[in-house]
Image (cartoon, helix red, strand yellow):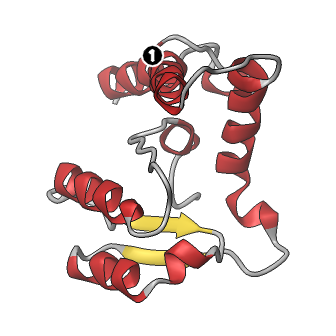
């Protein structure tokens, strides 16, 4: 049995867009940590081996918040294929062919898209339901 359900993996739980990278990632991590601190399952942060996620302060913040850090091996993009797939869909449906006038406009468009993706965008693998509809349906039948 899979460690996490497909529905859980497809549901984008939290989004944070950093401005310039670097230590601004910490604000998003701390915000996400505060919103999920009392969850009943082990929290895992999975990423590639990018420089931001190897920063000592970032790694320490994960430890301080009891979040397990998981990183893909070099050259193994399939380790994180669900998120890679999501970002591919996001780029196709939101970004390609569109010119954004500012970083804030792009941020807002991404936030709106994530809400749309979770609440309205149906998925064949979820029996033609959105991730939120799929979760609600399965909670009722469980």
Front residue of this view, candidates 39 and 46: 46
Residue located at (51% from left, 11% from top):
120
Residue located at (68% from left, 59% from top):
80
Q: Position of residue 97 (x, y in %)?
A: 82, 17
Q: Which residue is mark 1?
A: 119
User: For residue 71, what is the image quadrant?
Assistant: bottom right
Q: In this figure, what is the number of numbered marks?
A: 1
For residue 13, above or below residue 23 = above
Position of the C terminus, as image quadrant, is top left
Q: Locate residue 97 relative to residue 101 in the image: left or right.
A: right
Callout 1 secondary element:
helix
Q: Farthest residue to the front: give it.
A: 101
Q: Position of residue 127 (x, y in %)?
A: 63, 18
Residue located at (53% from left, 27% from top):
110
Front residue of this view, candidates 100 and 114: 100
Q: Position of residue 76 (x, y in %)?
A: 81, 72
Label 1: few (<14), some (14–19) or many (≥20) C-alpha neighbours in 10 Å: some
């Amino acid at each position: 049995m899979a460690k996490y359900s497909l529905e859980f993996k497809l549901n984008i739980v939290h989004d944070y867009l950093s401005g310039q990278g670097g230590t601004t990632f910490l604000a998003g991590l701390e915000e996400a940590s505060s919103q999920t601190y009392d969850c009943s399952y082990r929290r895992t942060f999975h990423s590639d081996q990018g420089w931001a996620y190897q920063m000592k302060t970032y790694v320490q913040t994960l430890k301080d918040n009891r979040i397990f850090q998981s990183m893909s091996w070099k050259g193994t993009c399939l380790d994180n294929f669900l998120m890679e797939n999501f970002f591919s869909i996001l780029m196709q449906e939101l970004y390609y062919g569109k010119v954004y006038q500012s970083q804030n406009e792009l941020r807002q468009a991404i936030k709106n898209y994530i809400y749309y993706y979770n609440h309205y965008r149906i998925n064949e693998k979820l029996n033609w339901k959105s991730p939120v509809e799929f979760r609600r349906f399965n909670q009722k039948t469980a």
